[in-house]
Amino acid sequence: MSETTDQQAMSELAKLAKQSGLKVAGGKVRRSSSRFCLGVEHGDYNGTELFGVGTDRFIWLAYKPNGTDRVRLLSGNFPKDGLVEFTLGQTPPPKSAQNANSWARFPCGVDFVLRRAGCQFEQGFDAVLFGNIPGGGMSRSASLTLNLMLTMFEVNGVPPPDGLTVVDLAQAVENDYIGSPCGKLDQLMILFAKEGMGTYYDPKNRNISYVPLGAGATDFRLVSLDTGTIRPGLEKSTYRGRRAECDQLAALAKPVFGLTCLADVKDEALYQKILEHFGPKYPNLCERLDYIFHAQQRFYQMLEAWKRGDIETVGRIFRQDGLGLRDDYKISGPELETMCDIARTVPGVLGERMLGGGDKGASGALVRADAVEALKAAVATAYPRSRPAYADKYAVHVCRFVEGITTLPGL
């Protein structure tokens, strides 16, 4: 889907409200962003530091309390699911087959997790929603979950807890209710995103800070290269296996080397000892460590380059991370790599790699502003030839840094 303005989104929401009969006029609209991770992709569940930005592909949700204990929603992106409706506190059990293939699992999961946390909400709401976030790679599920959760608190007149607690609750929706083994990267980078800033997260002290791009940086754009493929939820993808492998190696190494997670491996000597000890029996697990170890080394170089405005180095590291995700972590996919191969041929593309959970969805690129049109032209020529099944489904999204969560005037 192409870029959508707030005005266009409002028009779409109004159509959905009229079509469904849901009473959202006079309410509010909450807009939640997507995200672009600059490091370390797949590092969150391995304990690494994280850095990224919020990006201007959004979910818009128009909502209004309805004076009942019912929640009623309609999504313009999933019209076949029809009206999603449930009574607060009466949702299907976690990981239920009843809504496993419907987006309804997200609002139901929000209700379940908040009630488990002690929120005895009684006020329901009507809502219509619409989004233009690609379906894989830019955190559509986290954006939706956060939007719904903040709405649930607001319509019940309850101030949300601190941001990191909201992140934990949103992660629990995906981990415990849906069965997706995601970490906290997506939720952190959306909830805390600030316009024009990079968001840095240190897991050791659960601290968020903001890092401005250094002065004099080359004018560049973040570009999402949506392959047109549909990625299943993380609970059904390669992601689950990769996380299990990382957890397995950390557990094996704990009694021998005292590890709590793979991010503990930061010096070369320890890294080599682990490879020598486990490599012969567990070569695949050591490949996962290869990526995490080297991505951590590159992370600090990337962060310093960002601070001084050296976007060329940021792009080069982004590209190196992509090769590691492809070759060592083995989490990419053929369509994702086709996009990367095309982008790599375009002068002015500073770096490219797959985004997000892997397998399908979108790749991303850091591109000099004056090279964006050349990249679009290259993709338009080469991608349909290489992947004809997706010739009418792919999209190129040119993004900027934005605020993660914004409340807009209602319809």
Image (cartoon, helix red, strand yellow):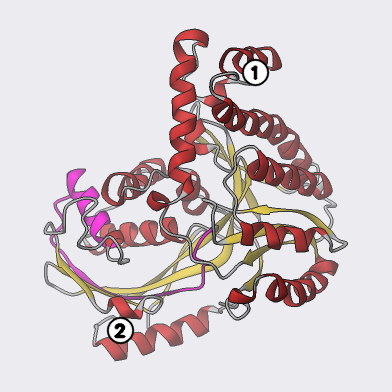
Q: Is residue 118 magenta?
A: yes
Q: Measure the alpha-carbon separation of dots 1 and 2.
A: 59 Å
Specify few, some or many for label 2: CA neighbours under 10 Å numbering under 14, 14-19, or 20 or more.
Answer: some
Counting from the top left corner in percent of width and height, residue 191 is at 46, 52
Of badges 1 and 2, the one in the foreground is 1
Q: Is residue 110 left or right of residue 211?
A: left
Q: Residue at x 63, y 13 (%)?
A: 276
Q: Residue at x 24, y 54 (%)?
A: 158
The residue to which callout 2 is attached is: 25
Relative to 187, is 299 above or below? above
Specify few, some or many for label 1: CA neighbours under 10 Å numbering under 14, 14-19, or 20 or more.
Answer: some
Element type at marker 2?
loop
First-in-chain label (1 vs 2):
2
Counting from the top left corner in percent of width and height, residue 20 is at 26, 86
Q: Is residue 164 magenta?
A: no
Magenta range: 107-136
Q: Is residue 94 visible?
A: yes
Q: Is residue 89 left or right of residue 209?
A: left
Quadrant of the frame with the C terminus: bottom left
Q: Is residue 65 left or right of residue 285?
A: left
Counting from the top left corner in percent of width and height, residue 267 is at 67, 17
The residue to which callout 1 is attached is: 271
Amino acid at circle 1: Tyr
Q: Residue furthest front?
A: 281
